[in-house]
Image: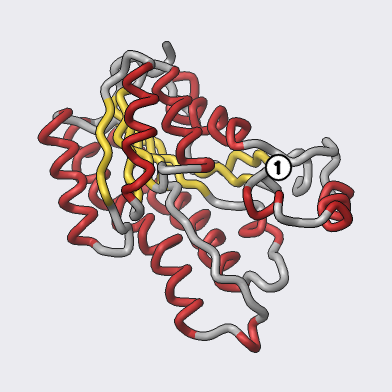
Amino acid sequence: MLLKDKIAFVTGAAQGIGKSCALVLAGAGADVVVGDCNPAKLPEVVTEIEAMGRRALGVQLDVTDPVQVKAAFEEIMQKFSRIDILVNNAGITRDGLLLRMKKEQWDAVLNTNLTGVFHCTQEAVKIMLKQKSGRIINIASVVGQMGNPGQANYVASKAGVIGFTKCVAQEVASRGITVNAVAPGFIDTAMTLALNEQARARLLERVPLGRMGTDLDVAFGVKFLASEEAAYVTGQVLNVNGGLYM
């Protein structure tokens, strides 16, 4: 029970990587708050966490709205009185080549993937500074390190998350708070499953381990960074990419 009785908050937790992070943290002993802009699937995640013997809370949350973010953190504090772990996972894509990309596509991705991380981290840090402890883990991406055609907005947002992580890590280290990022590579998701066999094969040719990653591969990295085992790790990017980027 690496995280026994810790309070964790995971954004974008209704499905995919966020859901896996929430369940893995609960499995390690944490009580977990799950937030998402689409509340329909949150009760299912809450039920799964409670079935593991942990407390859970679902909150509807649009990370682009600072008022909603502030309200979510107030609700968490009312129920749990502290926040030990924040996992900034909420993110979207609006892909397109630069010359055809609309400003609305750019703004939507940057507002969610980067400004949303700012909103949530700022609220968490206010609490963690008083506690003199905390773990903040931001979900970045391998493309934020190596680029990817057709994703200028997404790549810029994830590169921004990496820079933001390093800056905030330096600002709060003296108060016992660590800030790190996890950068997933090609992860088996609904998007990659929709690719035809030939396209998937081309992707896998670039991965030395020869397979797609899973949501759990990412969640296990998050669990490590959230634990006391990573107490001397801050300002780092944990690459979970099968060797795609070295």
Q: Position of residue 55 (x, y in %)?
A: 26, 22
Please identify the quadrant where the N terminus is shown: top left
Q: Residue at x 41, y 48 (%)?
A: 12
Q: What residue do we see at 39% from left, 25% from top?
A: 48
Q: What is the residue that sits farthest to the bottom in this orientation? A: 99
> In the orientation shown, which residue stands out farthest toward the top?
1
Check the picture and name the quadrant holding the C terminus: top right
For the point 50% across and 33% down, the residue is: 20
Q: Position of residue 75 (x, y in %)?
A: 15, 41
Residue located farthest toward the left when viewing the structure as drawn: 78
- Out of 201 and 170, give the one closest to the viewer: 201
Asked whether 84 or 21 is in front, the reply is 21
- Which residue does the image show at 53% across and 85% down from the upper left? 102
Q: How many marks?
A: 1
Query: Along the horizontal axis of the image, is 107 left or right of 177?
Result: right
Color theme of the render? secondary structure
Amino acid type indicated by mark 1: Asn
Q: Secondary structure at mark 1?
A: loop
Q: Is residue 51 left or right of residue 66?
A: right
Identify the image quadrant of residue 153: bottom right
Depth check: 125 or 205 in front? Answer: 205
Residue 69, by quadrant, is: bottom left
Category of crowding for the residue at label 1, using alpha-carbon neighbours closer than 10 angstroms: few (below 14), some (14–19), many (at least 20): many
The answer to whether 224 appears left or right of 241 in the picture is left
Q: Which residue is mark 1?
A: 241
Q: Position of residue 152 (x, y in %)?
A: 61, 73
Classify residue 100 as left or right of residue 202: left
93 or 181: which is nearer to us?
A: 93
Above or below 41: residue 108: below
